[in-house]
Image (cartoon, coloured by chain):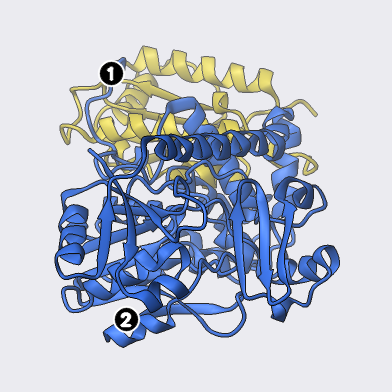
Chain colours: A blue, B yellow
Amino acid sequence: MSETYWGWSTKDDIRERGESGGFVSSLIESLVGSYDRVITIQKTGTVFEGRAIDVRDPSDVKMIQGALHSLCISMSAYIKKGKRTAIVLKPCDARAVIENMKRNHVLRDEVLLVGLNCGGTLPAVDTMKMIDVEFDIQPDEVLKEEISKGNLIFFTEDGEFSKSIDELEEKGYGRRESCRYCDFKIPSVCDIACGNWGTPAGKNITFVEVFTTRGQEALRHAVDEGFVSVKEPSEKLSEIRTKIDRSMRGLAKKWKAKVIGPVMEMSPEDRLDYIKDALSPCIGCYACRKACPICNCTSDCKCMQMDPDDDLPIPQYHAVRLLHLMESCIGCGNCTDVCPVDIPLARLHQLFSRTYEDRTGYRPGMSTDDTPPLSRGDYPEGY
Amino acid sequence: MTFEPKIVAFLCNWCSYGAADMAGTSRLQYPPNMRVIRFMCSGRIDPNFVLEAFLRGADGVMMTGCHIGDCHYIDGNYKTVHRYEFLKQYLDILGIGGERLQLEWCSAAEGQKFAEKVTEFTERIRELGPSPLKAGDE
């Protein structure tokens, strides 16, 4: 079940300031009061900085602005069991929430997920460097950034600067590695998915897809109370949206073959050596565990019983995490971001989970009806 | 020095430990490479136990339990099957090789089968050679 609309904010200032017609900002405003927490992100300076905020007052909506591609925070961490939460998140966050629902850390009935289409996020520091080197503009002059039709676009007071993402990524800039091979761009696991794909250019309109009855109710409430307006999208542009999604996923497939493919093609011994070498710089800070949106075990988890003096070929901490995440890694890349010794953790976890997905068809974070493989206890066929 | 495989076997209390006992009392010969760890149920075999066995130098791991339908706790061994299949994939991707993990059902009366399976598995590991995780140690 899904319904599609074109939506925009009815308030002129929000429509002007917000991304693509301010639909999400106004939807958020309409939700204040009906949820205990209404969580979204806020810009705190340049377009490279921001933080999550709990919108308590409709006037807080003024602080919400822009897509903030360089802000890679894990939104799922802000959902607490027992609090009715409406939250704006990107597709990987949404999948993390679904994984947590499977493990009963989040209750489906308590949350409203407002997803944003996502073509990828940018690492803030590298992006600032790239803007300086490749675009020849000062990072703090950037007013707005956008990823559109395979191009990375920065807006400053002097105008628009655009470059092909492919070319930038060849040079080592561009999106984060985990975003390059992520093939989940439209968050179909959410209640509502919003984005600017499939909207007429320059018209300040958001393409809205509603997936659940909870999403329908929220949208109806926002329309009835006069926060947003919606209308039927044109068929032609809806097709374009599907096409953009397909081409982005095609590109992700190519990146996956480029990044994960070579490791899987190695002989088992070489692959083991590759994993051992990759993990050898680990200093045991546990930052990856802390940043992981899936890891929910308490401090007595087996992975925490790693004795630093224990001379095992692979740190037990990582061996256990690789095992646990093989059934649940959604590829958000937070672990790679926080690692102080630059271990490509997301690549390793995705190597396991994506290969497992290819072999068995089990894809984490897609439906609360799936049972995680390690929790299964149904009658096994063929034994 | 010839290679002697180190094998860790997880046995359930009600069936496969009985089978091992049976093999012993029947004076059946099987290779002494196996180290037995006894569990109340094969469903108690945490995937981490298998993992730790490999990390600490096992060349092969055997998981054994009651036949499907005969579990003392009714459906404990259903879980064993799902974990076994998951672990096999994991060991395969990690590069240790899924064939170093084996699942067998042995009832308390199947001492003969137990001895045969242990012999078979030991021979297979002997052919495969030492676990790649230990490379450089020996």
Residue B105 in picture, x, y percent from top left: 33, 21
Chain on which label 1 sits: A
Residue A156 in picture, x, y percent from top left: 69, 74
**Residue type for callout 2:** Val
Classed neighbour count for the residue bearing mark 1: other residues with Cα under 10 Å, few (<14), some (14–19), many (≥20): few
A264 above or below A201?
above
Which residue does the numbered mark 1 point to in the structure image?
A381
Chain on which label 2 sits: A
Residue beneath the point at 56% across and 23% down: B99
Q: Secondary structure at mark 1?
A: loop
Nearest-to-viewer mark from 2 and 1: 2
Q: Secondary structure at mark 2?
A: loop
Look at the image and tell me in which quarter the N terminus of chain B lies. top right
A51 above or below B61?
below
Which residue does the numbered mark 2 point to in the structure image?
A55
A331 above or below A55?
above
Classed neighbour count for the residue bearing mark 2: other residues with Cα under 10 Å, few (<14), some (14–19), many (≥20): many
Which numbered marker is on residue A30?
Answer: none
Q: Nearer the viewer, residue A238 or A265?
A: A238
Instruction: Locate residue A87: give its quadrant.
Output: bottom left
Per the model, the C-alpha gap separating discs 2 and 1 is 50 Å
**Residue type for callout 1:** Glu
Residue A42 in picture, x, y percent from top left: 46, 78
Q: Please say if the residues under marks 2 and 1 sit with CB atoms less than 8 Å apart.
A: no
Does residue A298 show up? no
